Amino acid sequence: MSGHSQPPALLTRSQATYVWRGVFWVCVYLGLALAPLAVLLLGPTPPGGGFWFDLSLALGFAGTAMIGVQFVLTARFRRTSAPFGIDIIYYFHRYAAVVGFLLVLAHPAILVIENPGYVELLNPLEAPWYMTAGLVSLAAMLALLVTSLWRKQLRIDYDHWRIGHGILAVAALALALLHINSIGYYVAEPWQRGLWSVILASWLALLVYIRIVRPVRLLRAPYRVAEIREERGSSWTVALDPVGHGGFSFEPGQFVWLSLRASPFALREHPFSISSSPESAPRVEVTIKELGDFTRTIKDIEPGEIGYVDGPYGAFSIDRHSAAPGYVFIAGGIGVAPMMSMLRTLAARGDRRPHVLVCAHSCWERVIFREEIHALADKLQLHVVHALEDPPADWSGEVGYVTAAMLDRHLPTERADLEYFICGPAPMITKVERALYELGVPVRRFHTELFDLV
Amino acid sequence: MRSMVAKCLAIGSGALIVALAILFAWLQNP
């Protein structure tokens, strides 16, 4: 014995594995997005271009590649999403779409600014068809962006948006590829043609996987609605049992895509957090708040109906941080659903570590799982804090948004080593992260689950 | 915080692409 204790490791072995896998997939992403540029750099140049012409072409190729990789990002491959959490991949998908669109837009913009005579190529009545294909592709990309970034403001129903998004995305990329192939710059050499064929084949294979292979798999592994329970706060818990198969294992806090009253081919699936514990698997329960067109119909679902569950997804789980001395759960509204999965799991496992649960709600009557949370507080070493925006007259608890001062009153002094799980509306998550940072909690201890993907 | 990382990564990859595109155009037209 040396008498010297080892300093605590920043990351456990499994966390380090996730970090390395994350770095690997980021490199793969960059490789895919940059591949067309490599083709340009390695191949012979068509004569008579000039700096701005070549720059414009390079940006067009690279922007198209970035848009193409967007399909991979939302294909929901569990292996690639595991290190990050799929919620953040969808956020990246959104930001990368804006960047990719700007790159593609720069392609005609530079050409026209450098040579105003090219404006004629934007006139569909006079320009060759493949130029119009490029222009329509650009318009489709713009429509994709506008309808996704401002879907709610434009009052577009989610299911309709989802179908339109798929059609526009396929059309945008197909037209862009037609435009590239028909013009023939940098695609004339046999090896370049081979490479573009591989890219096209991969993209088509991905479409077949997303639209056919995965729906068929889901169709073969159906679930039956066993129970529908009304919860507080206009929320409903749907319990689903697998039919003719063993279901799947999941980590507490993860989420699934659920299709109810729709075939998996219809792409009318919605993401919901699992609120049950994996200890009660193969049953899966999701708790859904009435917020939109689909969620308002949940109460009409009858026990015995068939549903399809695609999952599990997400990195928001205590099982990723099992060595923690304790957990702090901070939930806003329906954000308590994944927390319930984790708390129920801790209770089922007989956990004796001290934990804190902060629930932010509008009013006392709308505190989802209120009674069960109090029962769990007795079972676990769980300190429960309710923060209400509109408290009753005799309320002696916390009032208003979750702040640093509020957290300071309830967190133990040894707070830096605890793991913090935050789930709720995006502005609340940002505020809580700032508050925790002010209280000296290291950023690596924050774990968030972002709702509102679109 | 995680959404900020996603935003930075998207903008970073875009900036890398622009830099490589400029390098390509410059190499073709020194």
Image (spheres, coloured by chain):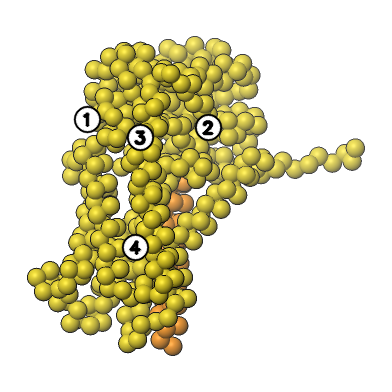
Chain colours: A yellow, B orange
* Distance (Cα) linking label 3 and label 4: 27 Å
Question: Which of the two marks, 2 or 4, is nearer to us in this view?
Answer: 4
- Using the image, tell me which numbered label, if any, was put on residue A317: 2
Q: Dot 1: few (<14), some (14–19), or many (≥20) neighbours within 10 Å?
A: few
Q: Earlier along the polypeptide chain: callout 3 or callout 2? A: 3
Report the amino acid beneath label 4.
Thr
Image side of residue B20 versus residue A416, left or right: left
Question: Which of the two marks, 3 or 1, is nearer to us in this view?
Answer: 3
Q: Earlier along the polypeptide chain: callout 4 or callout 1? A: 4
Look at mark 4 in the image and give the residue it sits on: A64
Figure check: A391 above or below A437: above
Look at mark 1 in the image and give the residue it sits on: A293
Q: Assess whether mark 4 and mark 2 are in contact (beta carbons under 8 angstroms).
A: no
Q: Earlier along the polypeptide chain: callout 3 or callout 1? A: 3
Question: Which of the two marks, 3 or 4, is nearer to us in this view?
Answer: 3
Task: Identify the chain of the residue marked 2, using the numbered disc in the image.
Answer: A
* Distance (Cα) linking label 1 and label 2: 29 Å
Residue A206: x and y, percent? 38, 48
Residue A46: x and y, percent? 36, 82
Image quadrant where one finds the C terminus of chain A: top left
